[in-house]
Image (cartoon, rainbow, N blue to C red):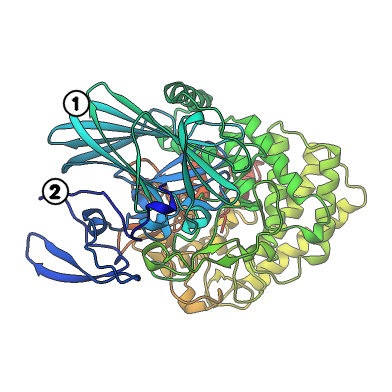
Amino acid sequence: MASRSCCDSPLDGRRHFGEGAEMCTPGRVLPGTRLVHLAKSKAKTKWAYEYQADNRGISRRPSPGEMAQATTKIEDYAFLSDTQTGALVSRDGCVDWLCFPRFDSGACFASLLGNKQNGHWRFFPAENVKATRRRYRGDTLILETEIETQSGAVRLIDFMPPRGENPDMVRIIEGVGGEVRMHMELIVRFDYGHIVPWVRRRPEYDGLEAVAGPNALILRTPVKMSGKDLTTVAEFTVKKGDRVPFVLTWFASHKNPPRNIDAEHALKDTEEFWEDWASHFQSKSKWRDAVLRSLLVLKGLTYAPTGGLVAAPTTSLPEEIGGVRNWDYRYCWLRDATLILLVIMHAGYTEEAKAWREWLLRAVAGSPAQMQIMYGVSGERRLDEYEIPWLSGYENSRPVRVGNAASNQFQLDVYGEVLAAMFQADRAGVKMTEPNWALMVALMKFLEAHWQDPDEGIWEMRGGRKHFTHSKMMAWVAFDRAIKLVEECGCAAGDQFERWQKIRAQIHAEVCARGYNPRKKAFTQYYGSDALDASLLTMPLSGFLPPSDERVRNTVEAIERELMHDGLVLRYRPEQCGVDGLPGREGVFLPCSFWLAMCWHILDRKKEARELFERLLDLRNDLGLLSEEYDPREKRQLGNFPQAFSHVALVACARHLSDEIVLPGARIHGLASVVETSR
């Protein structure tokens, strides 16, 4: 956060590792350097940097922090949220991703997708680190990271207080034992790690201010700070019992900075907020803690002002390391909204369910022909996709994308999701109003005319529209749930009711005739295809066919044979079917593996189902977080993080295996919306 006048080099850093500190193989080469392999032994591999003149001809050796910098694995991050935006914090206490003021705003810390020069905020001791430990405090999203050195130990307490207009990130350094000399390094780069701010001291507001364009940040702390190489740095000593606060606050640059908050009061309020929310969850399941942590993540992914929920707080974390399957998930998918509505409703959070239902209804309001599959957190429709050339991508996975072109796709399945959610909500007491039912009738009228059209499908294929079997099945779900809203919930349909019944029967017959491949002995990805697709695991869960149907059992067995990798499930095999229009591969899709566990459970393979579920729980990181995909070969998580639907699927599967869910044949419908995926 130093001013431009402080700049004498594009490289900077104060990170110090002494002799014997753990060094990871560098994950990226810094500007002005090249990596040189010096020696290799059984004990360790040694690396060094041969430095070269930088782009202005000035020769300098990179700092120890630059030489030590290595890419943090996706699963090594923690998630913070104030229910309007979120941050990712690495295991060693570095904030590598933060968007202010909303989830989908430009990041001011973007080193997650580049390097430290794209912005981060880090505290670290001056001496070697002996050990680090971290946890969430109780049932909250307050992160505590303990750092132990030879001379003592400190606890880094990170949180984002739920707020109104101005978001804060609060970091408190607590002395746990002994005496530790600490360093702070703050590099602010607005607009996704691109814009260097102008920095000035604001004594009248008791802080250091960074401004660029519409954005401004103010950092308040009792610690003396200074500028060096476009970086704000500080050195201070923490003794046992000390508590040193740092409060970073965003505000619109045309306004004065907001009033300072008391870090300790904010900590107490934040803890009470999360603990109170968590206290409403009641469960005796053996997996209660895992389910509650997933529910807390889902609450953290909520944009509180509107009730919308983002699929993830990040963009462009890759589905294949080094590949191009990198997407922006900081938006609200209709599918996700229905999934969350049902999961939260079943967990007892009726008010959140009402808010999410209202967001969904506002989003789809208007012409049914213009309904999108996703929207911005406030219902924005224009989510134009573009690439950011100055970010190198997570582990060189390019391009980095902002926006999502899939927002313009046609996907039949979302109609089934919306109707299933409305039906289940009505049955749970969130009653359908007359205006809302009129909107549902309009959606059904549109679907009557378009269910026979090809679409891009649940996986947002970019290789052209097809008659995807899952999409047709979910069109059937839409008509089935609309009919049940009339039969069981008292909604009026007039002469449309009989027409819906005929179309429901027509779709069912077509899917069974054209979606099932007798030669393959399975329902396949699209009509006439030999390729399998894990989305069809939802067929018995949605009530389309009973688990006892031979075609269902055959399909599950075929998916086990052809789409399982190391005991986990792929969505499909892109290298074989070529339907998604993209090069490369991807990891196993975690929600699909949860679906398989649910299918095994209803097929009376309960022991296998529980073993698979327990294995999936083991894939969570130490804080209970999951991304969208997993690489069994490299033993690491892939994709945007944390991923809403992985946690939705976890909650649904736990309920299923605990026999808290009755199958559709027993008159409980809409489970398709619980087990559907968001991608």
- Residue 41 quadrant: bottom left
Task: Check the image and name the residue furthest to the front.
Answer: 5
Tell me the amino acid under the disc marked 2.
Gly
Q: Position of residue 278 (x, y in %)?
A: 49, 27
Q: Position of residue 450 (x, y in %)?
A: 79, 66
Q: Examine the rendering and report whether any part of residue 478 can be seen.
A: yes
Q: Position of residue 306 (x, y in %)?
A: 67, 39
Q: Earlier in the sequence, mark 2 or mark 1?
A: 2
Nearer to the camera, 163 or 532? 163
User: Taking 241 as reference, is 207 above or below it?
Assistant: below
Task: Name the residue: 62% across, 56% down.
Answer: 545
Q: Position of residue 631 (x, y in %)?
A: 36, 62
Q: Are marks 2 and 1 in contact (CB under 8 Å)?
A: no
Mark 1 surroundings: few (<14), some (14-19) or many (≥20) residues within 10 A: some
Task: Name the residue: 26% across, 49% down.
Answer: 14
Q: Position of 209 compared to 424: left or right? A: left
Q: Which mark is residue 647?
A: none
**Mark 1, residue position:** 177
**Regarding mark 1 in the picture, which secondary structure is present there?**
strand
Task: Name the residue: 31% across, 55% down.
Answer: 12
Nearer to the camera, 607 or 382? 382
Q: Examine the rendering and report whether any part of residue 646 can be seen.
A: no
Tell me the amino acid under the disc marked 1.
Gly
**Mark 2, residue position:** 18
